[in-house]
Image (cartoon, coloured by chain):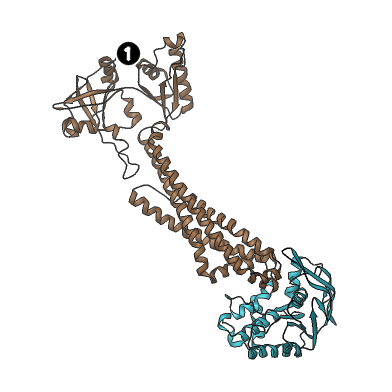
């Protein structure tokens, strides 16, 4: 089953007086259960592509279908709904809420979903954290964790809503090699368990761990 | 996420970064406290002025005075005798809407008793004057109708004059005092009258202790060529009502004068206004201080909320990436603002009440923090907070997730 179908994606930013063309017509397809790395030098448009695929940004032109739904035409509120249900996002800088505990951080997407009782939110967060080996960290604050642990908390948060796709933007970029390997091992496990994963990286070593590589250059897939 | 949940999240957030919240609270607390204090003291002063007016008998009385003669008076105007003692007697007989008629005559005359002498005020009046002005004899009695009818050479002394002339207020009773070179027997001495607007102020009623009262008939016979009055004060029957009484007095006097060469007005502004005028400046300064501190508080709150939003735009971006809607973010920020302003308002109210108590105690001013003041001050705090918080909240909610995430 094809999860992502992107056709002719273009994205133009306006930076002061200059128009910057980040994407110049990108076609991409990603199947359910695939583990795909988008790679390329900085400025190649890989992050822009990821943001559009992750519904954090909308394309200037082109169409994008996620799980059968045309995303390009959706309103802000519907987009928030899609982000909440279909996409799990992992950031380079983890982006955990510093004032919330690990458990509260992980349960946050379910809170935004609405209609999920508190007990169930907690149970689902617990289950995921146990699975990712973070059981003892449940009541801690993010600043009490190592970088690798934080990123795995972020992964748990991305997965808690059972999204169709897990997206990661340079997930090892702020980690040392040991922690980075832990995170990549987690991705490998999730992939083996059937999750669809798309990650952006400029590191060939990281890209090599994926099933398939989408190589970007100058706003195009090469 | 529904509204309640957004509000709860906002509340939770405010609790978690308590230090920062406290900082924005401070401006709010001080602003609110100063509003509370100003309003309470202001209210206290107003109540005090009211009390003063009652004390001097200004409430519910009608004052009749001669109107300024026109530049080119007509024959009728020239023919009028102006306000006279006879007018007063006429009103007393005919004005059914009145309960008291107090004609007055006033001069500065020389007082002398033994070796003590000075110049001071003498009031010629009638027994009704005592009713209207609520004065009480300390010893002896006040003037009687008989004194007026017989033009008796008797006087009732103010406390201060009795004290100055005879060494002690009570010692004056039965003695003889020379007023304007005529001898009078002291038949009464009035109680000392006191009223203080503030502990550092002079006795606002001291002038009442510095005078002597004699029968108006005696005053006219001894010192005047005519029976013209210097003032005429009336009191309406409660049942009749002030307006009806004024109308009746106007028609009766018009009938006697043939021209409206007099003014009739309800008292209440007159005496009290003069005494209260210094308060106006006082209140104004207080009010300016209150408004300035509230505005300052508002700016501080706006600034801190704004800074915290800039600081947290990335966080909002992350929340949006996790599925928060713009409305959800808006409600979240708004909830934080509400929590901060309500807590700040309440603490400010407490501080203001305490401050009011301290000021009222040390300056001996009456001041009460009424429910009205509490409502106004907390309402102001919340309004300021909402205005200050609304802009950052709107701004946070409007960003696209990717812009918010990249926010520098």
Question: The numbered mark 1 sits on a residue in which chain?
Answer: B
The image shows residue B279 at horizontal and vertical percentages of: 40, 41
Chain drawn brown in the picture: B
Looking at the image, residue B81 lies above or below residue A102: above
Residue A70: quadrant of the picture:
bottom right
Residue shown at the point (30%, 12%) measured from the top left: B225
Q: How many marks?
A: 1
Left or right of residue B192: residue A222: right
Q: Residue furthest left?
A: B114
Viewer-side residue, B20 vs B190: B20
Q: Position of residue B254 (x, y in %)?
A: 46, 15
Image position of A12 (left or right of B88): right
Indicate the quadrant where residue B392 lies.
Answer: bottom right
Q: Residue at x 44, y 22 (%)?
A: B263
Q: Which residue lies under the disc numbered 1?
A: B226
Q: Is residue A101 left or right of residue B349?
A: right
Q: Nearer the viewer, residue B34 or B395?
A: B395
Instruction: Point out the image quarter for the N terminus of chain A.
Output: bottom right
In the rendered view of the protein, which quadrant contains the C terminus of chain A?
bottom right
The residue lying at 54 percent from left, 60 percent from top is B301
> In cyan, which chain?
A
Badge 1 local density, few (<14 within 10 Å), some, or many (20+)? Answer: few
* SS at badge 1: loop
- Which residue is painted at 70% across and 89% down in the image? A184
Residue at the farthest front position:
A17
Q: Is residue A2 above or below residue B275?
A: below
Q: Residue B102: x and y, percent?
A: 35, 24
- Does residue B282 appear in the picture of this structure? yes
Q: With B394 as the anchor, is A46 left or right in this view? A: right
Residue B110 sits in quarter: top left
- Locate residue A36, reporting x and y percent: 78, 85
Using the rendered image of the protein, determine whether residue B138 is visible from the camera's viewpoint: no
């Amino acid at each position: 089953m094809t999860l992502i179908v992107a056709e002719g994606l273009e994205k133009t930013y306006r930076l002061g007086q200059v128009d910057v063309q980040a994407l110049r017509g990108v076609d991409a397809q990603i199947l359910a259960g695939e583990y795909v790395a988008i790679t390329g030098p900085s400025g190649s448009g890989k992050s822009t592509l990821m943001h559009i695929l992750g519904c954090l940004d909308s394309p200037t032109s082109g169409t994008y279908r996620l799980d059968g739904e045309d995303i390009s035409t959706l309103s802000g509120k519907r987009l928030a709904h899609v982000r909440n249900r279909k996409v799990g996002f992992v950031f380079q800088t983890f982006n955990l809420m510093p004032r919330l505990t690990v458990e509260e951080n992980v349960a946050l997407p379910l809170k935004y979903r609405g209609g999920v009782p508190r007990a169930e939110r907690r149970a689902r967060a617990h289950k995921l954290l146990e699975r990712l080996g973070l059981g003892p960290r449940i009541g801690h604050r993010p600043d009490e964790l190592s970088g690798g642990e934080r990123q795995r908390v972020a992964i748990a948060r991305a997965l808690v809503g059972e999204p169709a796709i897990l997206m990661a933007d340079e997930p090892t970029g702020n980690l040392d090699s040991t922690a980075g390997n832990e995170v990549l091992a987690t991705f490998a496990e999730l992939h083996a368990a059937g999750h669809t994963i798309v990650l952006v990286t400029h590191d060939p070593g990281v890209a090599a761990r994926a099933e398939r590589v989408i190589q970007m250059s100058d706003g195009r897939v090469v | 996420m529904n509204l309640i949940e957004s509000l709860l999240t906002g509340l939770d957030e405010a609790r978690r970064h308590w230090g920062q919240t406290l900082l924005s609270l401070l401006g709010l607390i001080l602003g609110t406290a100063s509003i509370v204090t100003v309003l309470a003291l202001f209210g206290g002063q107003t109540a005090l002025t009211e009390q003063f007016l009652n004390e001097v008998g200004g409430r519910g009385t009608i004052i009749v005075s001669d109107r300024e003669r026109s530049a080119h008076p007509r024959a009728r105007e020239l023919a009028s005798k102006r306000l006279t003692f006879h007018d007063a007697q006429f009103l007393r007989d005919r004005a059914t809407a009145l309960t008291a008629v107090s004609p007055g005559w006033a001069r500065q005359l020389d007082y002398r008793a033994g070796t003590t002498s000075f110049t001071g005020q003498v009031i010629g009046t009638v027994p009704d004057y005592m009713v209207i002005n609520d004065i009480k004899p300390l010893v002896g009695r006040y003037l009687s109708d008989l004194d007026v009818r017989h033009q008796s050479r008797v006087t009732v002394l103010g406390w201060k004059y009795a004290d100055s002339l005879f060494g002690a207020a009570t010692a004056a009773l039965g003695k003889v005092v020379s007023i304007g070179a005529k001898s009078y027997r002291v038949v009464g001495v009035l109680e000392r009258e006191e009223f203080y607007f503030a502990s550092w102020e002079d006795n606002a009623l001291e002038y009442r202790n510095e005078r002597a009262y004699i029968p108006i008939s005696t005053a006219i016979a001894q010192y005047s060529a005519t029976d013209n009055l210097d003032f005429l004060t009336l009191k309406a029957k409660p049942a009749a009502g002030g307006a009806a009484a004024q109308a009746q007095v106007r028609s009766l006097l018009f009938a006697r004068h043939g021209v409206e060469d007099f003014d009739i007005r309800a008292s209440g502004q007159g005496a009290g206004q003069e005494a209260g005028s210094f308060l106006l400046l006082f209140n104004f300064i207080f009010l300016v201080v209150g408004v300035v501190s509230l505005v300052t508080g508002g700016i501080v709150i706006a600034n801190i909320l704004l800074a915290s939003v800039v600081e947290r735009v990335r966080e909002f971006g992350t929340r949006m990436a996790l599925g928060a809607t713009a409305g959800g973010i808006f409600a979240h920020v708004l909830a934080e603002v509400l929590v901060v302003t309500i807590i700040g308002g309440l603490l400010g109210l407490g501080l203001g009440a305490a401050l009011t108590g301290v000021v009222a105690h040390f300056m001996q001013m009456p001041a009460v923090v009424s429910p009205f003041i509490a409502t106004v001050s907390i309402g102001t705090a919340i309004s300021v907070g909402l205005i200050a918080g609304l802009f950052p909240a709107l701004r946070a909610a409007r960003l696209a997730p990717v812009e918010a995430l990249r926010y520098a």
